Amino acid sequence: MRFSKSYIKTLKETPKEAEIASHKLLLRAGMIKKLTSGVYTYLPLGLKALKKVENIVRREMDRAGAQEIFMPVLQPAELWKESGRWEVMGPLMMKLQDRAKRDFVLGPTHEEVVTDVIRNDVASYKQLPLNLYQIQTKFRDEIRPRFGLMRGREFIMKDAYSFHATRESLDEEFDNMEATYKRIFSSCGLKFRPVEADSGAIGGSGSKEFHVLADSGEDEIIYCESCDYAANVETAVSKVFHAEKEELKAVELVDTPNVSKIEDVVEYLKVPVERTVKAMMYRDMGTDQVYMVLIRGDYEVNETKLKNAVDAIEVELLTDEQLEKLGLVKGFIGPFGIDLGDIKVVADDTVLEITNHTAGGNKIDTHYINVNYGRDYKADIVADIRKVRVGDNCITGGKLHSARGIECGQIFKLGDKYSKAMNATYLDENGKTQYMLMGCYGIGVTRTMAAAIEQNNDENGIIWPVSIAPYIVDVIPANIKNEGQVSLAEKIYNELQAENVDVMLDDRDEKPGFKFKDADLIGFPFKVVVGKRADEGIVEVKIRKTGETLEVSESEVVAKIKELMKLY
Ligand code: 9G3
């Protein structure tokens, strides 16, 4: 491509609304242009990189035995009513009506559509297993679209859906997709980690996320320094050390004037924090059920685990006035010596291991000591609802660390959630009607492209991995008025094109420095500068990632570039 002919508008200034590197650089390099909040146009350079990511995904999904289809964006509401998700997804769904006032949704995901496709076609176990995928635009009306392509309202996802007659077959495909995702993210030149994840609203059991590691990542990943355990903090678990068991003592109400924070209770009552229990008051936002959540004083409640324990879509802490209305004394709430009414108690499972623990006295400036679970109170629900802490021990013993991650992929075992709701059945080998088992597998293609920039940039701009760079080489004649330089540059440009190397020729009538800055901003992996030594047949090959400059004779340039392409 000739630069002088291409539609590339680089920006000197960073648009003020851009906060993270990829958002700034995609705009400055002229790769995307915002249409409206969370909605972007992909300009030629941006689209070329996007297509490279898509084609890596496509190549590996085909290789994994999945078959590509293309499903509609426009989905009838009936399907979502059948699956029971029409009402519960809230304002995140982009809904619209057609001329006959029929309800539709712009697809945020395609479980309902693909299950509808299959249930009318697959009738026998002989047709299973099946893995269908698409690379398609999705719509989700995010409250706060931000970070450019990282969290848009219209974005491109590869979403795949597999159908199985047995659990073993589903487990096999889940592992096949995990291996495939590793190949995809490696081929994109990304540093990533697969982590245990929460199945969330999608339901089903067993899910893994693939995080591209970057400080700007929205997610916190917990990982063990000595084994390969890694999990999203939402589901991560760790080893717990309990205070040693004591003889049960009698409960006692003690005055603790103005002592409510855990560290003050520990100080005032001279008890180890492992022998304290705090009560947090939560509300299920769907059912309004109030929960008294009990957890050891040195841990924090993990709201994702709590939601799963009480089967809520969303939970939130009660406000001060809601506490008052319930007659609860903020800072001194506890499970003992109180009429709970229809408040349900949820206890983190560590609470059951503590003998003679403290608890709120349910009266201002008081606490109970020597409270014992079982003897003095019971919980309605007992579960691990704690947030692991950096420095905790992994269940295998090693220390747990944390890193920031950008979730670029997620794979799920759905089970029969959708096939049951939508009656997708098949006849098994005994002629018996069975529900299919499903898996689903997503990759945020546009998000992955942005994540690649988060991981590969410096103060001059983007540093594209060769595999997804819009162009691999930028051939730059240093002086456009110098016949010799221009014709050698053209010669090298044509040779690289003949070798199917994506090459840009910067034939603009601009100073070399101007062209170098553009080349570094856009992030071409290599520059070939045809300058002063052109008449000796010597050109410079500059490597964007390392800043290295190699003197190469013109006859060696193509071979050198092809050799370097294997390394970056
Ligand atoms: C919705 C809306 C937003 C959503 C969903 C549904 C996320 C929804 C989860 C998934 C699960 C998998 C197939 C590919 C891999 C991910 N946000 N999810 O189901 F209606 Cl508005 O999308 N889907």
Image: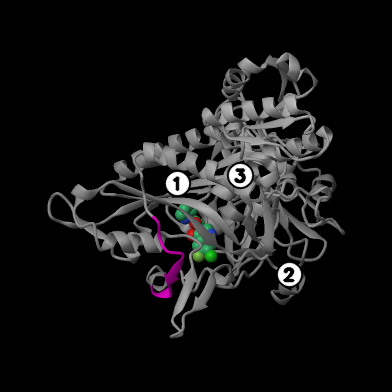
Task: Pick whichever of labels 3 and 2 is earlier in the sequence.
Answer: 2
User: In the visual, does 209 lie left or right of 339?
Assistant: left
Mark 3 lies on a secondary structure that is: helix
Q: Is residue 346 above or below residue 8?
A: below
User: In the visual, does 312 lie left or right of 439?
Assistant: right
Q: Position of residue 176 (x, y in %)?
A: 39, 37
Mark 2 lies on a secondary structure that is: loop
Mark 1 lies on a secondary structure that is: loop
Residue 256 magenta-drawn? no
**What is the image's colouring?**
one colour
Residue 206's label in the rendered image is 1
How many other residues sit within 10 Å of disc 1, few (<14), some (14-19) or many (≥20)? some
Mark 2 beta carbon near ligand 1 (under 8 Å): no
The residue mark sitting in front, 3 or 2, is: 3
Q: Is residue 156 visible?
A: yes
Which residue occupies the extreme bottom position in the image? 100
How many other residues sit within 10 Å of disc 2, few (<14), some (14-19) or many (≥20)? few
**Labelled pair 3, 2 in contact (Cβ < 8 Å):** no
User: In the visual, does 266 lie left or right of 415?
Assistant: right
Mark 1 beta carbon near ligand 1 (under 8 Å): no
Task: Give the quarter of the image for residue 72.
Answer: bottom left
Nearest the viewer among 444 and 90 is: 444
Which amino acid type corresponds to the residue marked 1 in the rendered image?
Gly
Which residue occupies the extreme left position in the image? 430
Q: Position of residue 471 (x, y in %)?
A: 62, 37
* Chain part drawn in magenta: 70-78
Q: What residue does disc 2 label?
A: 319
Residue 449's label in the rendered image is 3
Which amino acid type corresponds to the residue marked 2 in the rendered image?
Thr
The quarter of the picture where the C terminus appears is top right
Q: CA distance from mark 3 to mark 2?
A: 41 Å
